[in-house]
Image: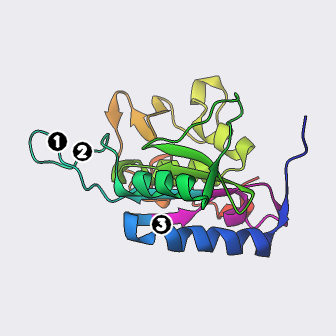
Amino acid sequence: MSQKTRLPLDQAKGLAVEVCQLFAPYVERQQIAGSIRRGSVMVGDIEVCCIARQDSENLFGDPDPDAPHGLLRFINEGIRDGTFETRPDINGRVSVGSKMAWLKYRGFALDVFCFAPEQWGVGLLIRTGSAAFSEAFVTQHQLGGNFLRAGQSVKGWRIWNTGIALDTPEEINCFEVCGRAFIAPEDRT
C-alpha cells in the first residue's frame, strides 16, 4: 500500500485557496473543510464543500440540481487540460460527478463535495470532521451517538426528526437542533 502524501498546513491551505479561486465563477458558496479547516499540522488532502451555480432548469423552469452544472463542466475541462487529475476513491473507483469528485490538484489529493443549500450545514459539518467526530455526530441516540436527540437521524445530508427534515442551512443550526453548543472546527477530535 502506498503512503499518502501529507503536506504542512500552510502549503495545503495555499493549494486549497488556489482551488477555491478557480471554482469561484462556478459556485454560489464554498468553504475549505477537512483537516485544513480543523488546523491540523499535517494535511493529507484538500476538501472543498460548495453549492454549485445551477445553470440548468428542469421541465418546470426550476433549477435542476441533478443536471451537470458549470463547476462539473469546469472540472471535466480541467481533467482534459491537466489542471486536475482523476484519482480512485477508497474502493478503487474513479468518481467525478455532479455531487462529488475525487481529484488531484498539483499532485495533491482534492475532494470536492457539492451540496444543495438545505444540505449545507450538515454537509460542511460532516466533511470538516474529524472522522471520529462526524461518526459520533451522525450515530443515532439509541445506538450510542452523543449528538442527535431521540428520534433524530441523518440522511441525505439532512437531519431528520421523526420523518421531518429539520432546517439546518448553517453548520451552527446542526448543533442547535441537537441541543448542543457550537463546537469550533479545531476542537472536533
Q: The N terminus appears in which quarter of the rendering?
A: top right
Earlier sequence position, callout 2 versus callout 1: 1
Earlier sequence position, callout 1 versus callout 3: 3
Would you name the residue on which mark 1 appears?
A: 58
Image position, residue 135 (x, y; %): 67, 37
Q: Looking at the image, which residue is at 43% across and 35% down?
A: 156
Q: Which residues are magenta?
A: 30-47
* In the image, residue 37 lies in the stretch drawn in magenta: yes
Say which quarter of the image contains residue 136. top right
Would you name the residue on which mark 2 appears?
A: 64
Q: Looking at the image, which residue is at 54% across and 53% down?
A: 80
Q: Residue furthest top?
A: 143
**Residue 119: in sight, yes or no?**
yes
Would you name the residue on which mark 3 appears?
A: 23
Image position, residue 174 (x, y; %): 48, 51
Q: Amino acid at mark 3?
A: Phe
Label 2's element? loop
Image position, residue 107 (x, y; %): 75, 58
Q: Residue furthest front?
A: 81
Q: Looking at the image, which residue is at 44% across and 71% down?
A: 24
Q: Residues within 10 Å of mark 2 (few under 14, many from 20)?
A: some
Q: Residue furthest left?
A: 60
Q: Amino acid at mark 1?
A: Asn
* In the image, residue 96 lies in the stretch drawn in magenta: no
Q: Nearer the viewer, residue 134 or 43?
A: 43
Q: State left or right for residue 131 relative to residue 19.
A: right
Say which quarter of the image contains residue 101. top right
Image position, residue 58 (x, y; %): 16, 41
**Is residue 178 shown above or below 150?**
below
Tag 2–tag 1 contact (CB < 8 Å): yes
